């Protein structure tokens, strides 16, 4: 992974350059954010194809076959937040890029015609894609697999990206070649659409691999890491059995489950969308309760969800999707949620932002809470690109703006995920202060997370939330920078040598845990600096007032982290 | 004018208090902005009725019968810009408030039921208005006139304000009681809607007047001022003959007339929407080519525009409305523009923002440039409150966000008026730097405006534009603060004693021109400080990049004021 591919869509120029020295220790989010910060004018319009860039970067371990270590970072200036964005996905693209030796692909400029970027053993080409315009991500993937090989890994945009909607995702293929692993948040699919690039197709067949410096040591280290993952109750038991949806029960129980546009923290229909129910349905219908999203993963927390006829409806039905499109809309049917998820995948949309936008629309009276078929119809409008669909596809803040709804659960233009900050206060601190906007992946503080030197933290209390968020924002940025899945933290935070050994075997360099944390911290600081230059201030580091003012039933809690303390989270 | 009425809509409490000493020399915009800055949390949601306030304030001369001196300031935090806003209107409300002795009406809190605020000789009451919900501003005015007297002056919101659309205006009655004088910009009608106040009705009949300190001197001074207005070619000749639409010819001629969403500076159909054509139509159909919007006005630049049947269609058809809904949409028919204006008045909408939003919608392919009947249909969607209408009614930036259009002529969330900044560069400086967002009324630099100490400025050149904008922003804020119409500047800037004499006669205080300018400057600085606390930075003080990068046909000019210089406009 010693080279960077730059593709100028305006004139078709493609150059491959060695990784410059100053970026030698950067991969993943650290690299995407650094490139964006160095090369994109902070005040540019995110859809100005000539100025904004879209950067794809795997982590150091992408080709190592280490479990949970092949995530992809996609970075650019976000059309949703107007700030810097890194959006992260599983799937097989990171490994394919790594196997071709690419540290990053940097998309620059904008094409006049729709194209596809193809990387394979024959080189790099831009090929016409006019026949794919308007196709769903799934249909486009079918065509492209036929054209460029079954093993091709891809990043594709659906109609939403073509429409340049600020909720458009970049859809990455899973190991079966199905584009079901979105780099969803922040509308980076619209940036790809602004460049008129329908897909990136990477087929590593016949190419030399990206060999580790010490193969034997790497083998031993990845094996030890896999064993540690399996030994941990979360990554070894709960996630493989129930998937991420295992969280519905516990988050509902503490009263932090976003319900009816964040007006309640507990959902009377929670049992209908729980991990237990999800497993029950999948088992009964002959689907898959476990499924890996990345090569080598031993957790396999994903799933394949079939309809009553046993035919696959959607894969990778996740907790956040289920909550934002379930309890948040007062919908207690997993079949409805699965259909919403399926449509989001086809159109190439962020399920979190869309669910939040529909929640605001329901709050504004556009349709009734609980109206599942209404929600499905509404989502189809987005796929068609009707004005109503464009409005919903503009995100939760835009819907609130248009409907005069003040109760909009968003920070820096981006909607919150499946954790109400009044009961998950550390996550609230992350929502408020992360340069990513309200993004749980930037530092999600689940109940009883251990804060080093302090112990397990009760997220429903005020104490230690700022420290916890700061710590996890650092860890999350570091993990994103190394291509690590967030679930790999379960063993690694207890024993960092699990990670350090793998990194050393792969790169031949000495790594320290402090160095890893520092990588995360520096990355976040780079992002904060970009946002400051783009016009963000402390005034943007806040939750909407109603989280401080409206007690959340049933506990009656508010978000009560003192503002002064909150502002110190990243400004140390 | 020694008292302030505070109305708390939440609990119905109404208190009348004397003007505090620190506000003794403040009226109009100086007072609305000061009250907003002191009392509204800068980061609050503008539609949070419990936090935002809506302030109505006439100027010192509102009851003087001086020509062009009875404008009304309406202030609050804007749902469109998220910053402080003063929106300014003619009509008869300022005089009525002044005659009742009110320096300001401050609306606080939010009601659960729709109400009307009534001020008359019997006192102040809040009365139910459930029967008026959904009524157009015109229909509501009819009902209210019947209920509270033909002489009642009013501020009314239409359906747009009820929908809390960020383009909603506060519609003020003219001297015939017709709500055709909007305080249009910045969506303050939505703030009134968020408080569920359909109208303010002020009937000064039977109340003691607001006597000047020196009636004889005032009489002489207002007479001298009226004569000076009539002697000036602009206020004495051009405006009375052609109205504000006189500008179409000259602005088109210099290549600064916004055409097809600011993609051209000259409109092939300009003759069809010119002041000459407007006059011709009005004369031929038996309308009124002159009409006063305020008591005592000698300019009478307004008009009454009839249809081919001779029946009134709309009154107060102005240059900015005509350009944004004419050339900007490639529509060359005044009848179509008049219909768009009529609908905006009925629904209570800002014609500038709506015209700009439709221009962006046309640019995004929602309908074709030049499609007049399509534009009328689209506007009717806004009045009905359909999702499509809500999108258009969200303003130009929101439409661009939803349709993926980067070519959006707006600053701080607000669309530009009828002056392309590439040829009217001083106005471009005002658009970029004014705390009001892109608002020509904050300091409009027309061709050949005289900059004191320098002389007439060529607005198509780079030189002196920053100084000119600074000077005119100061003057505009001062004039807004004194209730002066912008057209009163024609004689006053040449001979300030015309103004000072009137102020001294009315108030009994000594006024200096430096003091007047300082009032303007302090007001702007108060507003800038509010915006800074709300989260605005220098990054917000900029025109969209395309104004610097895309040459404007036919002259090929760009906006080329050096950024460093630009940023010094208000930061001295």
Image: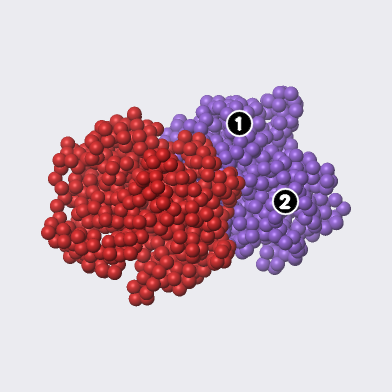
Chain colours: A purple, B red
- Judging depth in this view, the residue of B73 and A192 nearest the camera is B73
Q: Position of residue B553 (x, y in %)?
A: 57, 63
Picture quadrant where residue A159 is located: top right
- Judging depth in this view, the residue of B563 and B209 nearest the camera is B209
Q: Is residue A533 visible?
A: no
In the image, taking residue B533 as reference, residue B3 lies left or right, namely left
**Which label sits on residue A291?**
none
Q: Residue furthest front?
A: B284
| Residue at 65% from the left image edge and 31% from the top image edge | A339
| Residue at 72% from the left image edge and 64% from the top image edge | A19
**Which label sits on residue A377?**
1
- Judging depth in this view, the residue of B100 and B412 nearest the camera is B100
In the image, taking residue B220 as reference, residue A85 lies left or right, namely right
Residue receiving disc 2 = A114
Q: Residue furthest right?
A: A206
On the same chain: label 2 and label 1? yes
> Which chain is indicated by disc 2?
A
- Judging depth in this view, the residue of B477 and B382 nearest the camera is B382
Q: Position of residue B356 (x, y in %)?
A: 49, 50
Secondary structure of the residue carrying tag 2 is loop
In the image, taking residue A55 as reference, residue B194 lies left or right, namely left
> Which chain is indicated by disc 1?
A
Picture quadrant where residue B571 is located: bottom left
| Residue at 53% from the left image edge and 44% from the top image edge | B372
Q: Label 2 neighbourhood size at 10 Å, few (<14), some (14-19), many (20+)? A: many
């Amino acid at each position: 992974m010693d080279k960077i591919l730059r593709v100028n869509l305006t004139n078709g120029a493609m150059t491959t350059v060695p990784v410059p020295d100053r970026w030698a220790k950067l991969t993943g989010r650290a690299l995407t954010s650094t490139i964006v910060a160095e090369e994109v004018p902070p005040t540019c319009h995110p859809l100005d194809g000539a100025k904004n860039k879209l950067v794809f970067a795997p982590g150091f371990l992408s080709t190592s076959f280490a479990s949970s270590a092949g995530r992809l970072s996609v970075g650019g200036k976000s059309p949703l937040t107007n700030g810097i964005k890194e959006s992260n996905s599983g799937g097989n693209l990171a490994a394919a890029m790594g196997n071709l030796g690419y540290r990053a692909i940097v998309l620059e400029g904008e094409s006049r015609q729709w194209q596809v970027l193809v990387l394979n053993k024959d080189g790099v080409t831009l090929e016409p894609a006019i026949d794919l315009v308007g196709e769903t991500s799934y249909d486009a993937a079918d065509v492209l697999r036929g054209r460029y090989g079954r093993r091709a890994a891809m990043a594709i945009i659906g109609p939403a990206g073509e429409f340049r909607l600020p909720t458009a995702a970049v859809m990455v293929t899973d190991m079966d070649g199905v584009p079901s692993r979105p780099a969803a948040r922040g509308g980076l699919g619209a940036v790809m659409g602004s460049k008129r690039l329908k897909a990136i197709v990477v087929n590593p067949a016949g190419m030399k691999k990206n060999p580790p410096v010490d193969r034997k040591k790497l083998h031993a280290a990845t094996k030890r890491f896999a064993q540690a993952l399996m030994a941990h109750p979360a990554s070894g038991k709960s996630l493989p059995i129930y998937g991420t949806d295992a969280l519905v029960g516990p988050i509902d129980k503490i009263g932090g489950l976003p319900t009816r546009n964040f007006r309640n923290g507990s959902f009377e229909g929670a049992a209908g969308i729980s991990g237990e129910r999800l497993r029950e349905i999948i088992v009964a219908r002959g689907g898959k309760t476990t499924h890996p999203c990345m090569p080598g993963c031993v957790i396999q927390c994903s799933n394949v969800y079939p309809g009553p006829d046993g035919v696959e409806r959607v894969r990778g039905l996740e907790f956040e999707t289920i909550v934002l499109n379930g309890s948040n809309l007062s919908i207690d049917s997993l079949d409805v949620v699965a259909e919403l998820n399926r449509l989001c995948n086809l159109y190439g949309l962020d399920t979190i932002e869309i669910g939040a936008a529909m929640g605001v629309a329901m709050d504004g009276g556009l349709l009734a809470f609980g109206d599942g078929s209404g929600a499905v119809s509404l989502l189809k409008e987005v796929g068609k690109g009707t004005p109503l669909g464009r409005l919903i596809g503009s995100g939760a803040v835009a819907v609130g703006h248009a409907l005069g709804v003040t109760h909009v659960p968003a920070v820096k233009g981006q909607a919150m995920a499946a954790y109400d900050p009044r009961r998950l206060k550390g996550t609230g601190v992350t929502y408020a202060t992360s340069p990513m906007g309200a993004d749980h992946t930037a530092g999600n503080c689940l109940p009883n997370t251990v804060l080093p030197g302090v112990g397990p933290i009760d997220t429903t209390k005020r104490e230690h939330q700022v420290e916890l968020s700061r710590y996890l924002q650092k860890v999350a940025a570091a993990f994103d920078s190394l291509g690590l899945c967030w679930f790999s933290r379960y063993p690694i935070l207890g024993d960092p040598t699990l990670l350090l050994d793998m990194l050393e075997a792969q790169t031949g360099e000495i790594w320290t845990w402090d160095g890893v944390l520092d990588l995360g911290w520096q990355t976040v600081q780079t992002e904060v600096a970009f946002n400051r230059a783009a016009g963000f201030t402390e005034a943007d580091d806040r939750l909407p007032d109603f989280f401080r003012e409206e007690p959340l039933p049933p506990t009656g809690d508010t978000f009560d982290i003192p503002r002064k303390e909150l502002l110190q989270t990243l400004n140390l």
